Image (spheres, helix red, strand yellow):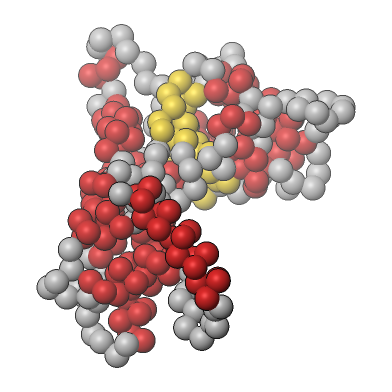
Amino acid sequence: MGNGSAKVYVQSTEGIHFDDVAGEDEAKESLTEIVDYLHNPKKYTDVGASMPKGILLVGPPGTGKTMLAKAVAGEASVPFFSISGSEFVEMFVGMGASKVRDLFKQAKEKAPCIVFIDEIDAIGQKRNSGRLGGNDEREQTLNQLLTEMDGFESNNGVIILAATNRPESLDPALTRPGRFDRRVPVELPDLQGREAILKVHAKKIKLADDVDFRTIARMAAGASGAELANIINEAALRAVRGGRTVVGQSDLEESIEVVIAGYQKKNAVLSNKEKMVVAYHEIGHALVAA
């Protein structure tokens, strides 16, 4: 009953690698160091350097935090334990803490290895944040996680990756150096990043010769990696609806509007006053963008 439900991924040949993740060069650089350490730790121990115990991937939803963790697993070729924060919180009190113990026991046996906790804010929230009583299931789980990460026992060879889009809600004891030593921001991609992400996702679809990814990347300002993947897919679906076998520039341009604003209303009847209000609103956007 108290056993962990962590999924273990051992080295696989068709996994995701850093080449498959575009637009997050700074984050990749930080994580490449971890992979290098797992491959040849002697280089670091000779200097007296120790690897960070925990790395916290922080950023808005859809920027590729989980994907980066999968890429680390693909590159490192060491056992990789994956679990979601919500899986620790169970019906019976004490089960969450028991699962944490079980997870780290397995990880120590397989060391060197990586433990990835997705959505860590499910268990890592600030303690006693407005709630009465200290016998809360999440609190017991968090206390156990704190002890495992930096208690009296040392966790040699176990590196913990965690992802969250709400870093401000995490307990300060969890984010201090010695537990999560390094915070890696995974931000929304810039123009070059968006172009690179579009090219990665466009590998799996048939493209027309007139497609210009730079223009599409400019039009999709502020889009996350997940939204860009969705834009490519919507464009492919639009091409199929139009009876074409390749995706053209117009399909991609139209799909940006579909993903960001929704489908076009072709039969909507607008009064002249409504049209004027919409026109003023849109010219405002255009002026700000210009």
Residue drawn 45% across and 51% down?
Answer: 62
Percent across and percent down for residue 85 are 61, 42
158 or 183, which lies in front?
183
Asked which quadrant contains residue 113, the reply is top left
Farthest residue, direction right: 133
Whether residue 17 is visible: no
Query: Would you place residue 46 above or below residue 206 in this image?
Result: above
102 or 182, which lies in front?
182
Query: Would you place residue 270 above or below residue 97 in this image?
Result: below
Farthest residue, direction left: 209
Residue drawn 46% across and 39% down?
Answer: 59
Percent across and percent down for residue 207 are 19, 73
Left/right of residue 177 with respect to residue 23 in the rendered view: right
289 or 220, which lies in front?
289
Residue drawn 80% across and 28% down?
Answer: 130
Left/right of residue 21 with respect to residue 147 in the rendered view: left
Query: Would you place residue 159 above or below residue 25 in this image?
Result: above
Left/right of residue 290 with respect to residue 186 in the rendered view: left
Asked which quadrant contains residue 28, the reply is top left
How many numbered badges does the structure rendering display? 0
Percent across and percent down for residue 149 are 55, 23
Farthest residue, direction bottom: 243
Percent across and percent down for residue 277 are 52, 64
Whether residue 243 is visible: yes
